[in-house]
Image: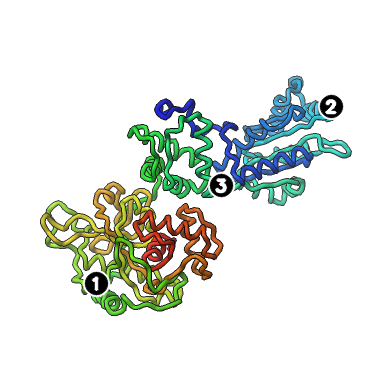
């Protein structure tokens, strides 16, 4: 549909295993090298194992196109076959004459053996490649093992390549498959693409499709693609195909993170797990006394910093970005389920006032740190606020509140949505009774006021990491950035790559882009790290 608009000769993200589109990432190049080595050196059995959609079938097609003319090949794509059907299909693929009706397995094997001996006599080689080999029955695998006995005194006549998903590894590890497993001399586990390979993969496919060069993917789009696909080529293709369709509908030649987010939503919006039936009540919201006690604690200790106790980065001072830490003392809340200022027709349960939303937010924090060690449990909670665009809510991994519409028309009191957990299709919020409720993403986005607040441990007040820092907490910073798709390695050393990744992160979220992990940068990374 969009090919002519962007100037393509064909769809660049077609899901068919076209070898022209094989992008030789380091992992795919190593897999191809293993295959070529095993075949040329006549190693007999070769196994390539990888997850669904990692490009195994495309790799097989590319392998066949790289074999020289002296190497004959047979490709088996249907692995749900019997041992006799396997032999018949192999002979058909090699172009061997058909066995008369009612021929036995021995007849098929004898013809195959004669063909292989003649081929070897001419200096040729032969490859049998079985895709989706994890589906082969034990009887067929045993027949495959027997084909490995077709050899001369010094050379294997047939090189057998088994390509399959991770279940193939378990299948071969079974005691009954020990004889076959021990014969596999070349193995390779095919991994998904690394973050740094996403741009090259996308640009390679655009180039092969004959694009005119007027289509541009922004850097933040590549990060989103990796975040959603985890480097899986099939997922990348599906995501980019939908992104181009969205861009075509908007008559845009630019693909940014917003379009990728929309593409992800359109592809997988119906797959999220929803809360069904009755909601659960939070046990920790038992009485107003508990809520008031928590806020009194915060008011007394919110600004207290404890140095070098958090298993996370630390600094005494960081240049403040355009948004500041909320330093105002917290008032004790008047706990109530509704608010008299709400207009008729507005939901009195979901939209909380300032005091109630804060009470629940701090209680959620205390609940979340339980079991994380004495240091975390003793850390005093503090509140911090950022101005966050609505599309970034999917990155929030810990409870937060976001300012929503006013509680009533003309009221000066803001209403808040208290988000306990973000789902791909929406979010789980806490209502005025302390119950969990599922909000659709559309509602959340439309009522997103921009100001996001969350609770972080006051130990972050000692946070200061910069280039050259050697601190165990550097590893955690790198881990979070890498999970978000930034180009950084988890080495534990604050090197130049880490500084650039931190700077890019700061720039994207409106912080002072100085490459230093201080309080605000650390707090936002803390929010975006897995609980």
Q: Nearer the viewer, mark 2 or mark 1?
A: 1
SS of the residue at dot 2? loop
Which residue occupies 36% across, 44% down?
Answer: 258
The residue at the point 45 percent across, 38 percent down is: 240
Residue position for label 2: 122
Ranked by sequence position, the earlier of labels 2 and 1 is: 2
User: Can residue 269 be spotted in the picture?
Assistant: no
Q: Which of marks 3 and 1 is in front?
A: 1
Q: Name the residue under label 3.
A: 192
Residue neighbourhood size for the residue with mark 3, other residues' Cα within 10 Å, grouped as few (<14), some (14–19), many (≥20): many
Residue 328 image label: 1
Residue 86 on image: x %, y %: 70, 31
Task: Give the quarter of the figure containing the N terminus.
Answer: top left
What residue is drawn where x is 28% and y is 79%? 300
Helix, strand or loop at label 3? It is: loop
388 vs 329: above or below: above
Q: Can residue 312 be seen in this view?
A: yes
Circle nearer the N terminus (3, 2):
2
| In the image, residue 313 above or below residue 134 | below
**Figure quadrant of residue 278:** bottom left
Residue, x 37% and y 32% (percent of image)?
248
Q: Nearer the viewer, residue 97 or 240?
A: 240
Quarter the C terminus occupies: bottom left
Q: Find residue 385 and report its horizontal and vertical position in percent.
A: 30, 63
**Residue 184 placement, left or right of 230:** right
């Amino acid at each position: 549909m969009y090919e002519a608009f962007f100037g393509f000769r064909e769809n660049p993200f077609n899901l068919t295993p076209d070898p022209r589109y094989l992008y030789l990432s380091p992992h795919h190049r190593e897999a191809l090298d293993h295959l070529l080595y095993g075949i040329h050196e006549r190693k007999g059995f070769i196994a390539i194992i990888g997850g669904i959609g990692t490009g195994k079938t495309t790799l097989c097609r590319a392998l066949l196109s790289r074999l020289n003319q002296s190497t004959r090949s047979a490709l088996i794509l249907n692995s749900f076959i019997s041992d006799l059907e396997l032999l018949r299909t192999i002979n058909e693929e090699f172009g061997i004459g058909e066995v008369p009706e009612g021929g036995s397995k021995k007849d098929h094997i004898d013809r195959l053996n004669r063909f292989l001996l003649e081929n070897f006599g001419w200096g040729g080689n032969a490859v049998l490649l079985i895709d989706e080999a994890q589906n082969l029955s034990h009887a067929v695998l045993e027949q495959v093992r027997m084909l490995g006995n077709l050899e001369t005194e010094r050379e294997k006549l047939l090189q057998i390549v088994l390509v399959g998903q991770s279940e193939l590894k378990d299948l071969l590890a079974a005691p009954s498959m020990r004889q076959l497993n021990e014969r596999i001399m070349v193995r390779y586990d095919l991994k998904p693409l690394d973050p740094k390979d996403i741009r090259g993969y996308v640009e390679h496919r655009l180039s092969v499709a004959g694009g005119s060069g007027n289509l541009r993917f922004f850097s933040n789009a590549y990060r989103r693609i990796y975040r959603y696909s985890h480097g899986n080529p099939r997922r990348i293709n599906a995501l980019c195909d939908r992104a181009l369709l969205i861009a075509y509908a908007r008559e845009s030649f630019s693909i940014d993170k917003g379009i990728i987010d929309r593409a992800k939503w359109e592809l997988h919006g119906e797959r999220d797990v929803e809360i069904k039936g009755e909601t659960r009540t939070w046990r920790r919201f038992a009485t107003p006394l508990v809520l008031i006690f928590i806020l009194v604690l915060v008011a007394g200790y919110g600004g207290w910093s404890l140095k070098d106790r958090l298993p996370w980065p630390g600094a005494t001072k960081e240049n403040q970005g355009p948004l500041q830490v909320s330093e105002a003392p917290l008032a004790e809340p008047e706990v109530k389920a509704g608010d008299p200022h709400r207009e008729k027709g507005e939901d009195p349960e979901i939209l909380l006032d300032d005091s109630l939303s804060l009470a629940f937010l701090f209680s959620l924090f205390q609940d979340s740190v339980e079991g994380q060690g004495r240091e975390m449990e003793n850390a005093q909670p503090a509140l911090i606020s950022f101005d966050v665009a609505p599309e970034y809510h999917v990155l929030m991994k810990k409870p937060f509140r976001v300012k929503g519409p006013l509680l009533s028309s003309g009221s000066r009191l803001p209403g808040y949505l208290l988000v306990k957990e973000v789902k791909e299709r929406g979010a789980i919020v806490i209502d005025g009774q302390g119950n969990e409720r599922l909000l659709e993403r559309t509602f959340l986005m439309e009522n997103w006021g921009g100001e996001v607040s969350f609770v972080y441990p006051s130990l972050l007040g000692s946070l200061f990491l910069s280039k050259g820092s050697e601190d165990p907490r550097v590893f955690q910073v790198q881990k979070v950035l890498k999970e978000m798709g930034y180009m950084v390695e988890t080495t534990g050393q604050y090197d130049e790559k880490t500084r650039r990744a931190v700077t890019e992160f700061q720039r994207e979220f409106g912080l002072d882009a100085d490459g230093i992990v201080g309080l605000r940068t650390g707090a936002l990374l803390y929010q975006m790290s897995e609980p």
